Image: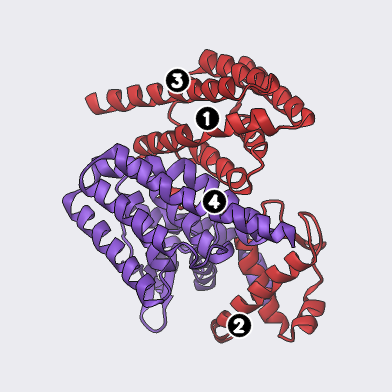
Chain colours: A purple, B red
Amino acid sequence: MNKDTSSAKPLAEMVEENLIQYIIENDMQAGDRIPNEFELAEKLGVSRSTIREAVKLLVSRNVLVIRRGAGTYVSDKKGIAEDPLGLAFVHDKYALAMDLLDVRIILEPEIASMAAIKATDEEIEQIVDQCRKVEELYEKGEDHRLEDVKFHELIARCSRNVVIEKIIPVINTAVVLFADITKRKLKQETISTHRDIADAIRSRDPGAAKYAMMMHLIYNRQMIAKLIKERDEK
Amino acid sequence: MNKDTSSAKPLAEMVEENLIQYIIENDMQAGDRIPNEFELAEKLGVSRSTIREAVKLLVSRNVLVIRRGAGTYVSDKKGIAEDPLGLAFVHDKYALAMDLLDVRIILEPEIASMAAIKATDEEIEQIVDQCRKVEELYEKGEDHRLEDVKFHELIARCSRNVVIEKIIPVINTAVVLFADITKRKLKQETISTHRDIADAIRSRDPGAAKYAMMMHLIYNRQMIAKLIKERDEK
C-alpha cells in the first residue's frame, strides 16, 4: 500500500484535474452520480487504484461524496472545502470574532442592498420564511445558529454574484465554528434587525436593506468589543 | 488496502483534528517538522496507517507538506486550500471576472484605507518595492501577474485583519487562475494607479489610498464590461 499510494500521487493529481474537467464538461450538478471505478479507469486509461486515490482527494475537497454501497456523487458543497481559509489555526478567538465581523460589515450591507434590487419574488418569500424560522428557534431556546447562517446565505444568493454566494457562507459558518463568542446575548436585537432586513428586501428598498444589515452587524460588533474589554480586564 | 482505508476513514478524520490541535497547542509555524509516523501513532494510540491517512487529508488541505525523504512539515499555505471557493466550477469566465472584481471593489478600497493607517514603516517600504517590481515586469513585457497579486496581498496584510489577509490572496489568485480576461490591456492604468496607491499609503493618507484603489479597480471594471460587451456582440 505504501509504495502504491506514494508512487500514484502525482498521477492521481492529474486524474483529479481530469475528473474536474469531466464534471464541468458534462455540466454535472450536485447529486449527479459519476461513473464507477471500472468505467473511469477505462475512460482515463489509468488503474483503479489511481482513480480511487483521485476520488479520495476530490472527496477531501468536497467536490465528490461517496455514498456507501450506492456510488460516488457530485457533492452539494460545490468544492468548497471545510474551513477553506484555515481559520481553525487562528489562536485568539476573540480577535477572530472581531475580524470576521469587520469583514461582514464591509460586505453584507452592500449585499443586502443588491438583494433588495435583484431578488425574485420566490427568493423574497424564502428569506421571509427563513427569518421566521430563526426567530422561532430563538424563542424556543433552541440552537438557531445554522439557520441564521442560512438566512444570510439566502440573501447573499440574491446578489447574483457567484463569489459573494460562496464567500458569505464560509465567513458566517466560521463565526459559528471558530468564533462564537456572542452566543445568545443578542436575542432581541437579532430578531428585530433580521425582521428589518427581510422587510426592506421585500419592499425592494436597497437603502433600507443596507442600513438594516449595518445595524444588525453593529449590534454584534458592539457586543464583541464589550466581551473583548471584559476579557482584557480580567 | 481497500478495506483498511474505508474502515479507517472516520478514525482518520478524528486523528486529523487531533493533529490540528497538536499544531495549534505547540504553536507550530510554517516549516516546522511534525513528529514521524511511529511517534505520532504511539502518541495518539492509533495505527501507522491511520496516521498516514490523516496526514494525507491534511496535505490535501494544505496544512501539512511532505518532503520526500525528509519528513512532514507544517505547510506555508496555512491550511488555505487550492481554489478554496470552488471557482474552477464556474462556467462563464467573463461573468466570473466581473463578480471577482465587484467583490474586490467592495473590499479593497476599505483595505487600502486601513493599510494607510496601520502599516509599519517596514511594510510601507515592502509595498513601495513591490510596486516597483510589478512595474519593471510590466515594462519588460514579462509576466507580472503573481507579483501583482503579492502587491495586493502586502496591502491586505497591513489591515491587521486575519480574515482579510487570507481572503484577498484567494480572490486575487482566482483572477489569475480562472478569470484573467483583461490580460495586458491596462498597462499604463495599472502602473499609475499602483503608484498612487503606494504613495497614498506611504503618506499615511487613508482617503487617498481608498480612492486610488477604487480608481485602480474601476479601470479594471470598465475593461471587463467592454470585453463582455464585445463578446456578446459577436
Tag count in the figure?
A: 4
Q: Secondary structure at mark 3?
A: helix
Look at mark 3 in the image and give the residue it sits on: B219
Look at mark 1 in the image and give the residue it sits on: B109
Q: Earlier in the sequence, mark 2 or mark 3?
A: 2
Looking at the rendered structure, the kind of residue marked 4 is Gln
Look at mark 4 in the image and give the residue it sits on: A222
Is the N terminus of chain A in the top left, top right, bottom left or bottom right quadrant?
bottom right
Discs 2 and 3 share one subunit: yes
Q: CA distance from mark 2 to mark 1?
A: 45 Å
> Label 1: chain?
B
Q: Is residue A11 left or right of residue A38?
A: right
> Label 3: chain?
B
* Residue B5 in sight from this viewpoint: no
Looking at the rendered structure, the kind of residue marked 3 is Tyr
Is the C terminus of chain A in the top left, top right, bottom left or bottom right quadrant?
bottom right
Give the answer, above or below, for where A227 lies relative to B112.
below
Q: Is residue A79 left or right of residue A85?
A: left
Instruction: Please tell me how crowded label 1 is: few (under 14), some (14-19), or many (20+) other residues with Cα within 10 Å.
Output: many
The one of A59 and B212 positioned closer to us in this rendering:
B212
The one of A192 and B203 positioned closer to us in this rendering:
A192
Q: Secondary structure at mark 2?
A: helix
Q: Residue at x 27, y 57 (%)?
A: A127
